[in-house]
Amino acid sequence: MNGKMRLLMAILIVYPLSIAAQGIDDIIKSLKNVECYESTMKYQVLMSLQADVSYTVKLNSMNAPGDSLAPCDYLINWTLATPDGESTGFSAYYDGNAYNFRGDRLLEYHYEWDSIPFRPRGRSAAALPGVQRSAQFTTLLPQFIAEELQTIVTSPDYTYSFHTDTVVADRRCNALEAVMTMGGEVYKEITYAFDPVTSMPLYSEIENNPGALAEQTLISDYSYAADKAPCAEISEEGLREMYPEIFEKYRESNYAIENLPQQRLPAFSLPTTTGERYSRLLGDKFRTPTIIVLIDPASTFARATVNDIRKGVEALPYNADVIWAFVSNNADTIDEIIPQPLMGEHILMSAKSLARDCGVSSYPVSIIVGTDGVVNDVILGYNNDLTSVVIQKMALAAKSR
């Protein structure tokens, strides 16, 4: 039994559990109900097998009691000092919208377009949280700490103790210590320190795999400004104003098909009906002006769309390519619509991810892309003039080469 475990057991003997639970319940309540939170934190990762890492993190959160996906809206900015200079990034979440920027990638997820990334993956204790909960540093927000404390006091895997009017990291506080044990092995040792007046976090130390070769210690040291600024609502407009360069350079989708022209076609990698894959990176060039048709084979206008677009492409004075991107996973159904591709055609399936990234909500949609990989125009839906519209827009795409 290690020293920390012996200390915890000794404290539990002399400190009544009912009083400890009452004190923790008060802290959980305060953390859950904080309406506007802001702090700056020094976050250290100490590893036995690698060099230590130190971040400066700014945390902002607002309570979101009506949101079933996360307990709060949040904006997290971080800075990491590296030998090559500072590396920065941010994570944000509000109302089913999640953004994460690190390196040169801005990833974004929108529940109304695709709910799967927001769902836990796996089962029970091995389940991985959705994107809104797994972003770096989210567990350090007070609303998420409240959830962790609730797990500690209710799970049989934890042994815990609570101390009032104590000192942790040279700060007077109320503190909780906990040990997670499974199968007789200690997996985690945790210390949280909270302000005795506000109950907001002051310090935390989490030791993963204590005593093991891969031992890792996570230390969070919080600080608070003397003057608390009012919380600003988190929104896409606000994020774009705050990070204009990031959204301009690294955004892969704006999730609105009407706004797609003059932007680079989002990257995609989709299976073909013959079992291969067709992939393009963001900004990849095309051999010739290309029309990408996002289509549902079950649509009433599926066959007419294929026939009319083929007529338009055939009438062009140059050889254009066509990518038929079916949102269905059923190759047999797709083969009924297009039994054989023509020269310059590619038939893809399972294209819902591409539709989502382009902001498509109904089908068919035809996307005209120039040789530079930038979208020239879009054609929404089907109408009796589709052939002439394709000829006109593809001709304009050829002029912009």
Image (cartoon, rainbow, N blue to C red):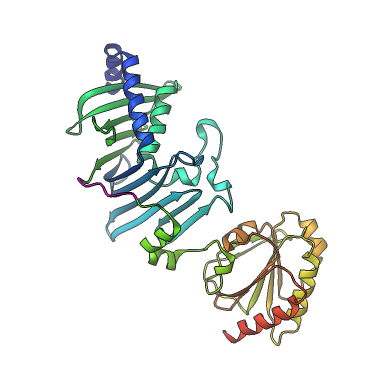
> Residue at position x 33%, y 26% from top?
26
Magenta residues span 226-231
Which part of the image, by quadrant, shows the N terminus?
top left
x and y, in percent, of residue 238 in the image: 40, 59
Q: Is residue 119 left or right of residue 80?
A: right
Q: Is residue 262 visible?
A: yes
x and y, in percent, of residue 180 in the image: 39, 26
Q: Is residue 106 left or right of residue 86?
A: right
Q: Is residue 107 above or below residue 122?
A: below
> Residue at position x 38%, y 40% from top?
139
> Residue at position x 45%, y 58% from top?
236
Residue 249 location, quadrant: bottom left
Outermost front residue: 230
Residue 14 location, quadrant: top left
Q: Is residue 147 above or below residue 244?
A: above
Give the prevailing secondary structure in the magenta stretch: loop
Q: Is residue 338 visible?
A: no
Q: Nearer the viewer, residue 180 or 112?
A: 112
x and y, in percent, of residue 296 in the image: 73, 60
Q: Nearer the viewer, residue 376 or 50?
A: 376
Total tally of numbered discs in the picture: 0
Q: Is residue 68 above or below residue 293?
A: above
Which part of the image, by quadrant, shows the C terminus?
bottom right
Q: Is residue 2 left or right of residue 363?
A: left
x and y, in percent, of residue 299 in the image: 77, 60
> Residue at position x 52%, y 36% from top?
127
